[in-house]
Image: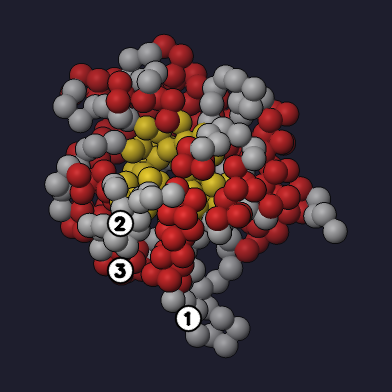
């Protein structure tokens, strides 16, 4: 029997609040949810990505928010389409993502701030907690203090709306942990947090486990990309058991979202990735 969408969403909300203790009062093992970016499914911004994610074994999909186009989530009819597709496959929407900011920077482009504001409205309507705001490519602010300050100014304007709607803007960039904390302090609103990409930080040769601990201790990581370059998860440079220990130490409740991590066939790689994360983070 098909569950009505409203009841499906209400049920999902209930289960998201289940206690970590079982009926006997004993602490239950953490069960981290595992998602995948829709661009790694080759279906960015398309409702068919839920069926493919289910086939590969994922719990959820990080869905691209495209401000324009046939399946743009700026259109209420498309929001319903995506929610129905997710329900049909029993696959969740882990988060939205605005990778489009890499080409049309939030810091310097006129339309980008309006797109993020529209995305906030979409998140409320679709009951999605987090959105990834990308600061790479044309939007890279690592070595550009002027553009960093412009981005902060825009996030200062956007954050109150996000707070009102009870959603989080996840700031993903090449900044190190202390630089991220400086940005968050200047924004001054808990509706903006860090979207932490483990491999990106490792590529910058940051002390990633120390940085993760600092950010987790401050409760500012909203979501994580589980990622390797040129290898499948568990076969590269990231020590995922150490990552799990940090997440559990600081009671991280968010998703693990797979990005990249392909060696050979992409479908087989993603099946291996989700299997590795299930073994490493659920046993």
Image position of 91 with respect to 81: above or below:
below
Regarding mark 2 in the picture, which secondary structure is present there? helix
Q: Is residue 100 left or right of residue 247?
A: right
Using the image as rendered, state which of residue 173 and residue 179 is in the foreground.
173
Residue at x-position 57% and y-position 88%: 24
How far apart, in angstroms, are the residues tagged by discs 2 and 1? 21 Å
Image position of 234 with respect to 69: above or below:
below
Residue ranking furthest to the right? 1
Q: Is residue 177 left or right of residue 122?
A: left
- Tell me which label, 2 or 1, sits earlier in the chain: 1
Q: Which mark is residue 241?
A: 3
Residue ranking furthest to the bottom? 24
Is residue 255 visible to the viewer in this orientation of the structure?
no
- Tell me which label, 2 or 3, sits earlier in the chain: 2
Q: Which mark is residue 27?
A: 1
Marks 2/3 in contact by CB < 8 Å: the verdict is no
Image position, residue 111 (x, y; %): 46, 14
Which label lies toward us, 3 or 1? 3
Q: Which mark is residue 280?
A: none
**Which residue carries the number 2 mark?**
216
Image position, residue 135 (x, y; %): 32, 30
How far apart, in angstroms, are the residues tagged by discs 3 and 1? 20 Å
Image position of 52 with respect to 243: above or below:
above
Which label lies toward us, 2 or 3? 3
Residue ranking furthest to the front? 264
Image position, residue 195 (x, y; %): 36, 44
Q: Residues within 10 Å of mark 3 (few under 14, many from 20)?
A: few
């Amino acid at each position: 029997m098909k569950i009505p969408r409203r009841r499906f969403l209400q049920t999902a909300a209930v289960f998201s609040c289940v206690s970590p203790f079982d009926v006997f009062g004993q602490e239950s093992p953490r069960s981290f949810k595992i998602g995948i970016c829709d661009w790694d499914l080759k279906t960015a911004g398309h409702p068919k990505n839920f069926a493919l994610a289910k086939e590969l074994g994922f719990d959820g999909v990080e869905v691209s928010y495209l401000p324009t186009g046939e399946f743009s989530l700026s259109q209420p009819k498309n929001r319903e389409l995506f929610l129905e597709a997710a329900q049909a496959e029993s696959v969740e929407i882990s988060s939205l993502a605005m990778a489009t900011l890499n080409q049309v920077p939030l810091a310097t482009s006129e339309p980008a701030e309006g797109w993020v504001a529209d995305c906030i409205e979409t998140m409320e309507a679709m009951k999605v907690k987090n959105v990834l705001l990308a600061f790479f490519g044309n939007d890279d602010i690592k070595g550009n203090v002027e553009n960093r300050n412009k981005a902060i100014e825009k996030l200062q304007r956007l954050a109150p709306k996000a707070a009102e709607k009870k959603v989080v803007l996840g700031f993903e960039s090449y900044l190190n942990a202390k630089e991220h904390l400086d940005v968050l302090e200047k924004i001054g609103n808990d509706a903006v947090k860090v979207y932490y990409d483990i491999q990106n930080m490792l590529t910058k040769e940051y002390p990633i486990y120390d940085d993760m601990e600092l950010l987790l201790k401050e409760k500012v990581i909203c979501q994580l990309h589980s990622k390797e370059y040129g290898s499948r998860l568990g076969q590269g440079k990231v020590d995922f058991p150490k990552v799990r220990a940090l997440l559990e130490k600081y009671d991280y409740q968010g998703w693990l979202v797979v990005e990249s991590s392909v060696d050979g066939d992409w479908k087989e790689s993603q099946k291996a990735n989700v299997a590795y994360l299930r073994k490493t983070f659920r046993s």
